[in-house]
Structure formats: structure tokens, C-alpha cells
């Protein structure tokens, strides 16, 4: 355990190092060094020469002149440091934890000595030699390589032989820095002792040493120091054999009461050093560079104050390597909303917190300790099986109201002159017209008739009548016909069922003629699936099953609508001019349909405004094809005649639409005059060619006029218009593709929101479920309120619950989209998350948040799988 992190956390300025005196400075923990330097500098400007001495300078000779004794001046094996303990200045730092001093100075002591005598030698070798030859020698006579500093050596009650190498080095090193007066006294006392006695002391280390050391007693600690200093023997050996006489504290609880209540900040303040899970699953202290930054995944567990309890968690002490002794206080769990004082007076709770490591529960989290962002292991776009059960239907089973089409409708003029990076809210969503069209289709598709008396037919159920008028026109098929929307129980799809009332099937082959129409798969033809007769309606009805195109209307409804109410009831609505491009679009689409139909040896036979569906803007489909083949099976005309009639019907259709009059073909000359006046000669010529009764009239605008009157010749004549229509359709396709790509972005954010809401404030999942191999008691903190989840909770507030300076809600769509997009990308940008009680402010990056989101969600998925087993 290094104190570097702690030192950095509280004393960032102490990071600067003095090159020349590195050995001596490294003896002192970072925090102490900073303080000691400050004090020394304040007391005597020249004091810092020791620290600032260049390499090669005899730092030892400088040390005794230091007016203010360094932190290691304690005469006692207790490594605790109380610098300037008689000062109550808040800026003073008091280290009450002896452990902090002991371990970091072990190697440093050797470093110092190596620098003094034999820089070439290895650390361990040098340290052993120091202990053997110089440490316990007194007066210099007994030591062959005693130095001035070593003659000052004085170690009161040494702990034990076995621990000599581990403990004596730092002690001896500290003695090097004793004040001049004290060392001189020690030297005088030592000079009075015989060399044999000195050797005996060196070998009988720990045995009745107190007597022999009385002559060189260290200065007794000041009362307040002793009160505030924990006995090092207890911390190292578990007990102090001199407890009755030892002035230091042996009860850790008293330590907290005596000292920590007085000093809010000191080097033993709760550590911000995160415990990182290494690859083998053990905890290691974070590196110096990571001391204060709250790395989301690996930082100490965050437990809101309200969630924290003293419920025990397994101790980490048993996991620690024997040589790395960690003071319990160093591993305090960071609890938002909890003051440092509270943590300090409860060392047991902190010790219990050591063993609790929610992060080791997830293998994915341990991967976070790595420097790389291991996103490859997690595919955020993969379909989670846990999500597969989600309903696709809005308001399914609940109250159904009309979709809120107005939600995104632009109010007022659109802003102009936006810069390249500026967007309006509408830029993030699909165009309003398309969205409304799709939503209406979905709404119409779900329409059901309550208390419907329409019976199910074969596999079709939930029949819903699509007819808009109760008056049925029998002129087309010779039968009254109705059309229903129905759901097939075979495949669950919706179909349109056209029923011809009172149809009597006299010839079986008649109904088989519908089979040929099943092969017509053209984008401009409503596909026929089957035909059958039924008596489900109480009569003999012919049923033609076709594709269902929700929210479509006929060309008759589009261009020849009747005014339904008022004095104009029944009258044809005033015609509006139909653009020529629309007419060409109709011609090309129907031409394409006829090409497919005629190519299959069939004829459409019904090309009339009421039997052509407009399924979306300018998108038409021939409807009710093949019905006449069944109904007029025995009175059928020659195919060539029927196919030529298809072209004539197409001509009349365009003529009527262009004139805005369903009976325009009855006054041909007048209607053609209107066409000539209102449209180009190219369209006029095309219409004339279509309605011309001559069988060999050539092709419209074709170089030769001798071609046959068929669909191929017709399409060749309008090739230029077909290319134009094809190009506009390609543009439409591109636009839709871009819209789809934009929606893909929205679906990304929806996935994020799903995960975020699945994790946030989940009440039932306890953290203890995710500690693999945990034998300790049940963790007290709720899963959703700790670790990564706590960050994510604060992030949710940051994104959605922002308020302005007056506390009013901020509903900034740009902010929300910005945050979610950055979270999805996992950027390195850092944000500050503030707890709701404003007692904690955490700085995290989107990258860390993303890792936490993914790992937390994986925790949930795993927990769900486990419960399913
Ligand atoms: N395959 C279909 N999919 C969806 N809606 C359809 C389908 N076929 C027809 N419709 C709708 O059903 C309604 C009635 O269609 P239909 O073909 O009966 O026209 P109509 O105006 O009633 O003509 P007619 O008076 O000659 O029966 C129209 O609004 C039409 O849009």
C-alpha cells in the first residue's frame, strides 16, 4: 500500500521532487514531506538546502542542522509522526497512523544509507549490513564502518529478533535525523558502555533491552502526542508487551476519540485511493496517477449515506500479502454524504468494508482495470434475449386514443441561416408527413369492430368492413361487392377479402382461373392470394383474398371525391388540376402492371378509378384484377381484345383524371381540347394513342407508326417518361434510406434508454448476489445504489432532471440527445455529477459511464439467467 495516492489526493503540490536529496525525501511519505518542507522553510530559509542539495551532496551532514526535526525524529519505535503537534493550526498535518510511516520508510532508509556509503550495492544487501554492523553499535567503537550518524543510533525497546530486518531499518534510519542535542546525548551514553556490552546488545536484541537503553532514553512523547499516537507494537505484533508503561495508545477506539475528532483532515483521512481489481481478481491499490480521479469502475464503492449500515462485509485483511501491511483506515469505503470524521471514528466498519468488492463480481468489470477500452467483448447492438418479449404494440389492450400527430409538428416558420453544426429538433426525427402516414396506417390496421356480427370465414377472423358507402355499385362485376379487412389464423397477417354477394359458381374451372393471378407479383398490382366460395354470410358468396394496404384509398376517392354533407351532397367536388408528372406516374405504373399481366397471358379488365388503390403518395396499384375472369368465365372475349381494351381503359382513366370528371370520356372532343390546353402535346399524344380504337396505330411518339397496339409498343413509346419516373422514384428511395438511417440513430438511443431505465433504482437486486465466492455476510448496500449504478443514477439526473438557477425544470432536447449520443459513443469528455443532496460531486467520463452501463446491464442479464435455471 502506498501513500502516494493519499498524498496526491490531499497534497497535490507535494508531487514535486527534489532531485538531489531524493533519498532523504523518499523516506518520508509524500504528505509528510510536503509538510515538513513547508515547516522547515518557514522556520529557516536555509533549511531547505538539505532537500535541495544536488546529487552527491552529503545530505547526512545537513540533516542535523535542520532546525525543525523531520517527521522521523521520533525516538520511539512507533513510527507515528507528530510534526508540530503543539500547534493547532488547521494546516498542520498529523499522522497518527504509525503504519504509514513504517512501511514506506523501509526501503528509503536503505536508499539513504546506500547513498552515503556504497551507492553501488544492492538495496537488500546494504540494508542487511546496516542492521548487522551498525545499527546496534554504540559509540562508534564497536562498528567498523560506523559513521557519525550511526553513532547516534539509539533504539529503545526493539520488538523481536525475527522482525529485526523488517522493523529495525526504518528505525535506524529515523535515528539519523535526530536533533543534534539528542544524538549527542546518545553518543555520550553510548561511549560509556563497553564494546562487549554493545555487541551483547546487538545480539540480545529484545531481551531485557529496556535496562540497557535507559541510559539513552528517547525523549518522552509529549502528553498530547502520546494521546494521539497509536502504539506501533500493537499494529505490528498485535499487542504491546509494555502496555502498562507505554505512553502510547493501545485501544484503537480511543485513538479515534482522542485525535480524529480534533483534526478533520490529516494523512489518515479516508482514502480516496480506489481499489483496483487486477486481472487475478485481487485488489491492488491504484497507482499514483489514479489517486483522485474517480475511475468509475474501479473506484471505491459508493454507497449513499442512507444506504450505508454497519452490516458487515468480509474483511480484506486475509487477502493481503503478509509483507504489505495496510492500515485499516486507508481502505475506507467512500460513502457519499458521509463526513470524514464519521469514517475515522468507525475503523471497524471501514475494515469490514475492505472485504466487500462488488466489482470483482463481474468479469467484465475486472476487464475495466485494463487500460484499453474493451468494448469488443460487449456488443451493445446485439439483441438481448431478455428484451425479446417486449410488446410491439402501443397501447395494446389499454385505452386507445388517436396518436398525437401534433407532437413534432413545426410551429411557426422554420429557422433559416443555421450554421453547419446547428440542428433543429425536426432534424432528429423522420419527416412529419411520413411519420403521420405510417402512424395512421398502423392505427387503421389495428381497427376492430366491437360487437361485430360478421362471422369468421375459413381461417379469416376479425373481419372489419372497409367500405365507406352502404350503396354498392353492381355495374362493374354484376354483383354487389363488399370488402373486409381480416386476420388469417394461419400466418397472423392481414388480408383484404372482397365478397361478391349471391355469386353462384356454375363451373369449377371458373374459380381456378384465379390461380394464374397468384403468380402476378408486381409492385403496381394488388396481389391475389386465393378465391373460394362460402355460405358463411347466409348466401353463396365469392371471396377473393388479396393483399391488405392499410389506409389506402381509391383514385376515385382521391380525384373525384363527393362532398359528403350539406347542400353539395352527392355532387361532384370541384376538380383540381392534377400535375402532369402525377399523370405520367400513373401511366408508367399502370403500364408496368399491364406489362406483367399481359406477359402472363392475362388481362386486367378493370382499370377504373374505383378499382385502383392509392397506397401512398402517387403510388397506385391495380385492384380487383382477376375477378371478371371468374365471374365472366364463360363469356370471355379473346385475350388480345381484352388486352387492347386495357390500354383503352388506361387512356380513359387518364383523360378523366386530367379533366377531373368521371364522365369525361363521354364527351371526347371537349375533354381532349382541355387536355391540349392544360398539358403538353406529349401527354395529349399519349392519351390519344391509348384511346384510339385502331388496332395498328403505332406507338406514341415512336418513329414508326406501324407497330402493333400492345403494351410493349406502348412502353417503348413512353420510354423517356419511364426514365423520368424511375429517377424520381430513386430519389424517393434515397430519401427513405436516409430517413431510415436517421431512425437507426434513434433506435440506438432507445437501446441506451432501455438499459438505463432497467438499471436505475432497481429495487430487488442486492449487491451480495454478485460477489462470486463471497463468504461474508450479506452486503448492506443495494445494488442499484452502489458502484457503477450510483454513477448511472446521478447521470440520469444529469441528463433528464436538470434545473435552472431558479430551480425550474430544464427540458432541453439538445442537451438530452447530446448526452445520450456521447454516452453511446463513450467519449473521453468528463462531466460532473452531483448527488441530490449536493454533498458529493463526482467527475466521470462518458467512457467510464458506458462501461458501467454495459457491465451493470450484463449483471442484470446474468441474474435473470440464474433465476431462470
Ligand atoms: N386491398 C385493399 N386494401 C385496403 N383497402 C382496400 C383494398 N381494396 C379496397 N380497399 C378500400 O376499400 C374501400 C372500398 O373499396 P371498393 O373497391 O369497394 O371501392 P368502392 O368505392 O366501394 O367502389 P364500388 O362502389 O365500385 O364498390 C376503399 O376505400 C378502398 O380504399
Image (cartoon, rainbow, N blue to C red):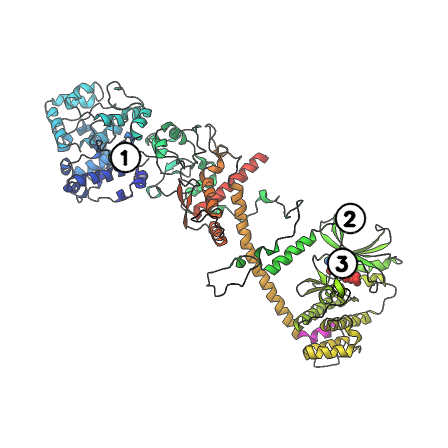
User: Could you tell me residue 330's position as x and y percent?
Assistant: 34, 33
The quadrant of the picture showing ligand 1 is bottom right
User: Nearest the camera: 24 or 330?
Assistant: 330
Q: Is residue 713 left or right of residue 285?
A: right
Kindly identify the residue that appears in the image at 16 percent across and 26 percent down: 137
Query: Helix or strand or loop: what does disc 1 sit on?
Result: helix
Q: Residues within 10 Å of mark 3 (few under 14, many from 20)?
A: few
Numbered disc total: 3
Q: Is residue 721 left or right of residue 382?
A: right
Q: Which mark is residue 104?
A: 1
Q: Which mark is residue 468?
A: 3
Is the CB of the residue bearing disc 3 within 8 angstroms of ligand 1? yes
Q: Is residue 404 visible?
A: yes
Q: CA distance from mark 2 to mark 3?
A: 17 Å
| Residue 706 lies in the magenta stretch | yes
The residue that label 2 is drawn on is 452
Query: Helix or strand or loop: what does disc 3 sit on?
Result: loop
Whichever of labels 1 and 3 marks the residue nearer the N terminus, that label is 1
Label the magenta part by its dominant secondary structure: loop
What are the residue bounds of the magenta stretch? Answer: 699-719
| Residue 540 lies in the magenta stretch | no
Is the CB of the residue bearing disc 2 within 8 angstroms of ligand 1? no
Q: CA distance from mark 1 to mark 3?
A: 90 Å
Placement of 741 over or under 304, stated as above or below: below
Amino acid at each position: 500500500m502506498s501513500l502516494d495516492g493519499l498524498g496526491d489526493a490531499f497534497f497535490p503540490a507535494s508531487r514535486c521532487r527534489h532531485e538531489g536529496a531524493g533519498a532523504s525525501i523518499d523516506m518520508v511519505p509524500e504528505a509528510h514531506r510536503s509538510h515538513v518542507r513547508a515547516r522547515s522553510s518557514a522556520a529557516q530559509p536555509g533549511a531547505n538546502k538539505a532537500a535541495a542539495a544536488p546529487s552527491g551532496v552529503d545530505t547526512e551532514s545537513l540533516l542535523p542542522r535542520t532546525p525543525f526535526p523531520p517527521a522521523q525524529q521520533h525516538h520511539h519505535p512507533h513510527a507515528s509522526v507528530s510534526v508540530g503537534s503543539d500547534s493547532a493550526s488547521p494546516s498542520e498535518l498529523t499522522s497518527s497512523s504509525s503504519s504509514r510511516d513504517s512501511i514506506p520508510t523501509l526501503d528509503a532508509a536503505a536508499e539513504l544509507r546506500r547513498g552515503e556509503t556504497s551507492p553501488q550495492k544492492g538495496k537488500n544487501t546494504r540494508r542487511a549490513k546496516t542492521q548487522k554492523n551498525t545499527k546496534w553499535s554504540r559509540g562508534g567503537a564497536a562498528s567498523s564502518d560506523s559513521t557519525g550518524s550511526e553513532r547516534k543510533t539509539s533504539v529503545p525497546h526493539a520488538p523481536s529478533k525475527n522482525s529485526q530486518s523488517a522493523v529495525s531499518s526504518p528505525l535506524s534510519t529515523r535515528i539519523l535525523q535526530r536533533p543534534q542535542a539528542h544524538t549527542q546525548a546518545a553518543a555520550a551514553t553510548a561511549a560509556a558502555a563497553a564494546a562487549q556490552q554493545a555487541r551483547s546488545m546487538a545480539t540480545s536484541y529484545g531481551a531485557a533491552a529496556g535496562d540497557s537503553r535507559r541510559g539513552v532514553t528517547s525523549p518522552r512523547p509529549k502528553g498530547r502526542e502520546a494521546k494521539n499516537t497509536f502504539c506501533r507494537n500493537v499494529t505490528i505484533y498485535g499487542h504491546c508487551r509494555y502496555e502498562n508503561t507505554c505512553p502510547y495508545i493501545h485501544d484503537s477506539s480511543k485513538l479515534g476519540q482522542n485525535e480524529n475528532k480534533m483534526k478533520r483532515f490529516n494523512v489518515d483521512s479516508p482514502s480516496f485511493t480506489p481499489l483496483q481489481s487486477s486481472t487475478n481478481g485481487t485488489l491492488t491499490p491504484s497507482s499514483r496517477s489514479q489517486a483522485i480521479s474517480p475511475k468509475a469502475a474501479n473506484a471505491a464503492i459508493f454507497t449513499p449515506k442512507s444506504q450505508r449500515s454497519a452490516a458487515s462485509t468480509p474483511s480484506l485483511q486475509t487477502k493481503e500479502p503478509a509483507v504489505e501491511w495496510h492500515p485499516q483506515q486507508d481502505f475506507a469505503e467512500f460513502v457519499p454524504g458521509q463526513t470524514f470524521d464519521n469514517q475515522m471514528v468507525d475503523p471497524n466498519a471501514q475494515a469490514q468494508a475492505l472485504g466487500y468488492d462488488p466489482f470483482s463480481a463481474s468479469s467484465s468489470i475486472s476487464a475495466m482495470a485494463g487500460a484499453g477500452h474493451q468494448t469488443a467483448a460487449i456488443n451493445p447492438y446485439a439483441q438481448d434475449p431478455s428484451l425479446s418479449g417486449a410488446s410491439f404494440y402501443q397501447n395494446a389492450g389499454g385505452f386507445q386514443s388517436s396518436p398525437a400527430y401534433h407532437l413534432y409538428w413545426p410551429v411557426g416558420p422554420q429557422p433559416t441561416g443555421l450554421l453547419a453544426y446547428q440542428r433543429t429538433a425536426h432534424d432528429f426525427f423522420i419527416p412529419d408527413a411520413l411519420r403521420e402516414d405510417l402512424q395512421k396506417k398502423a392505427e387503421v390496421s389495428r381497427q376492430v369492430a366491437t360487437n361485430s356480427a360478421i362471422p369468421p370465414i375459413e381461417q379469416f377472423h376479425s373481419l372489419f368492413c372497409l367500405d365507406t358507402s352502404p350503396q354498392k355499385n353492381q355495374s362493374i362485376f354484376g354483383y354487389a361487392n363488399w370488402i373486409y379487412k381480416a386476420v388469417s389464423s394461419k400466418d397472423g397477417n392481414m388480408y383484404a377479402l372482397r365478397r361478391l354477394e349471391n355469386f353462384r359458381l356454375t363451373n369449377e374451372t371458373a374459380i381456378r382461373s384465379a390461380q394464374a393471378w397468384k403468380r402476378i407479383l408486381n409492385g403496381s398490382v394488388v396481389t391475389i392470394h386465393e378465391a373460394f366460395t362460402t355460405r358463411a354470410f347466409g348466401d353463396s358468396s365469392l371471396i377473393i383474398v388479396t393483399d391488405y394496404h392499410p389506409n389506402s384509398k381509391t383514385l376515385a376517392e382521391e380525384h373525384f371525391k363527393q362532398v359528403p354533407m350539406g347542400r353539395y351532397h352527392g355532387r361532384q367536388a370541384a376538380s383540381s388540376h392534377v400535375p402532369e408528372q402525377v399523370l405520367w406516374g400513373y401511366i408508367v405504373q399502370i403500364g408496368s402492371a399491364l406489362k406483367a399481366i399481359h406477359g402472363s397471358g392475362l388481362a386486367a379488365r378493370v382499370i377504373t378509378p374505383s378499382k385502383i388503390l392509392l397506397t401512398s403518395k402517387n403510388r397506385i396499384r391495380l385492384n380487383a384484377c382477376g375477378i371478371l375472369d371468374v365471374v365472366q368465365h364463360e363469356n370471355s372475349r379473346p385475350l388480345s381484345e381484352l388486352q387492347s381494351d386495357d390500354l383503352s381503359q388506361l387512356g380513359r382513366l387518364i383523360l378523366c383524371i386530367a379533366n377531373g370528371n368521371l364522365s369525361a370520356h363521354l364527351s371526347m372532343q371537349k375533354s381532349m381540347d382541355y387536355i391540349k390546353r392544360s398539358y403538353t402535346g406529349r401527354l395529349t399524344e399519349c392519351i390519344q394513342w391509348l384511346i384510339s380504337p385502331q388496332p395498328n396505330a403505332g406507338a406514341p411518339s415512336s418513329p414508326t407508326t406501324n407497330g402493333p397496339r400492345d403494351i410493349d409498343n406502348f412502353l417503348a413509346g413512353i420510354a423517356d417518361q419511364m426514365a423520368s419516373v424511375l429517377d424520381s422514384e430513386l430519389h424517393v428511395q434515397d430519401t427513405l434510406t436516409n430517413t431510415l438511417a436517421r431512425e437507426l440513430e434513434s433506435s440506438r438511443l432507445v437501446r441506451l434508454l432501455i438499459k438505463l431505465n432497467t438499471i436505475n433504482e432497481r429495487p430487488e437486486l442486492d449487491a451480495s448476489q454478485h460477489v462470486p465466492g463471497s463468504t461474508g455476510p450479506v452486503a448492506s448496500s443495494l445494488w442499484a445504489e452502489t458502484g457503477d449504478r450510483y454513477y448511472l443514477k446521478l447521470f440520469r439526473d444529469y441528463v433528464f432532471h436538470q434545473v435552472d438557477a431558479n430551480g425550474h425544470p430544464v427540458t432541453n432536447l439538445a442537451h438530452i440527445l447530446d448526452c445520450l449520443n456521447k454516452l453511446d459513443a463513450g467519449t473521453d469528455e468528463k462531466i460532473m455529477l452531483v448527488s441530490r443532496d449536493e454533498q458529493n460531486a463526482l467527475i466521470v467520463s462518458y467512457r467510464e459511464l458506458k462501461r458501467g452501463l454495459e457491465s451493470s446491464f450484463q449483471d442484470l442479464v446474468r441474474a435473470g439467467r440464474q433465476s431462470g435455471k
